[in-house]
Image (cartoon, rainbow, N blue to C red):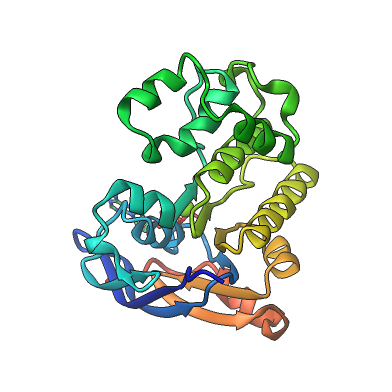
Amino acid sequence: MNDSSIDVTNMTVAFGHKHALSSISLSIKSGEQIALIGPSGAGKTTFLNSLAALTVPTEGEIALIGQNVRNMKDPKRRAKTIGMIRQQFDLVNELPVIHNVLAGRLSEWGLLKSLLSLVFPQEKQAAIQALKKVGLADKLYTKTGLLSGGEQQRVAMARLLLQNPAIILADEPVASLDPARSEDLLQMLIKLAAEGNQTLIASLHSVDFALTYFSRIIALKNGKLFFDLKNNEITKDRLSELYAIEEEQND
Ligand SMILES: Nc1ncnc2c1ncn2[C@@H]1O[C@H](COP(=O)(O)OP(=O)(O)OP(=O)(O)O)[C@@H](O)[C@H]1O
Ligand SMILES: [Mg+2]
């Protein structure tokens, strides 16, 4: 199996005086599927953004596939390593669905091919296959902005299929969906990552989903690693402690 490991050593992220993350160290093996949980403000998005090199840690190191993120400047290499699904999907509403999916390949193409793809979709078959996989084959040329939130999430997932990164980071991928569609989409994400041998980290507000679908659960609280356990090791007490509302901490 290809390497898609993650090693985080003593990572601290400070925004001014606020420590969004404090001295986080952990290792994730190739192909692991991990749920990231913790109360609002715990540092989940900051953690994922740091792995994706969207946020630069104040201290510590991150190695993806054995390579320091700070040195991963080549956008092509970066796109092959990390793919992210965010709450707002980052889709272009004005473009038809197929163009948004093809954008998953942009970093591999020269500028000319990228621009042409907006007129003559390149690798159309690959995009159609990806859209079929996420159950959207009938929406190829629909304007993306006209799709529902759940459908847009599927478009983002099809785009990720074309990008085919070693590591998938999903920040609350099912935040805006009803429970049945959340479950459906999460199952799809897990299946696609498993088929592609991709490492997956998904932040989730639903502890139920985390415990049901993920064998390893990493919990953050106040920017610290609160626990890193197998799903069957997690007790109700531990969860109550994780989500307990406390006095604001000054750090
Ligand atoms: N750019 C920023 N500038 C200043 N503070 C920030 C910034 N980004 C995050 N923070 C702070 O860092 C902490 C962690 O935020 P983060 O968004 O990572 O939490 P989260 O666990 O993703 O929360 P949620 O579940 O609400 O999405 C919060 O206290 C937040 O206010
Ligand atoms: Mg967040």
The relative height of residue 34 versus residue 183 in the rendered view (above or below) is below
Q: Residue at x 39, y 76 (%)?
A: 7
Give the left or right position of residue 185, taking residue 114 as reference.
right
Choose top left, top right, bottom left or bottom right for residue 12.
bottom left
In this picture, residue 138 sits left or right of residue 48:
right
Q: Indicate whether 54 appears above or below 228.
A: above
Above or below — where is 133 with respect to 249? above
Q: Residue furthest right?
A: 180
At which x and y percent is residue 129? 68, 36
The residue sitting at 61% across, 39% down in the picture is: 158
Which residue is more in the foreground, 119 or 241? Answer: 119
**Which is nearer the eye, 249 or 139?**
139
Image quarter of residue 10? bottom left
Task: Name the residue rendered at 69%, 40% in the picture.
Answer: 177
Percent position of residue 16, x then y: 19, 59
- Count numbered badges in the picture: 0
Tell me where residue 124 sits by quadrant: top right
Residue 250 in view of the camera: no
Where residue 183 appears, x then y in whole percent? 76, 51
Q: Nearer the viewer, residue 69 or 46?
A: 69
Residue at 51% from the left image edge and 31% from the top image edge: 102
In the rendered image, residue 138, in percent from the top left (x then y), is placed at: 75, 22
Q: Nearer the viewer, residue 238 or 27?
A: 27
Q: Quadrant of the N terminus?
A: bottom right
Q: Is residue 237 visible?
A: yes
Quadrant of the drawing holding the C terminus = bottom left
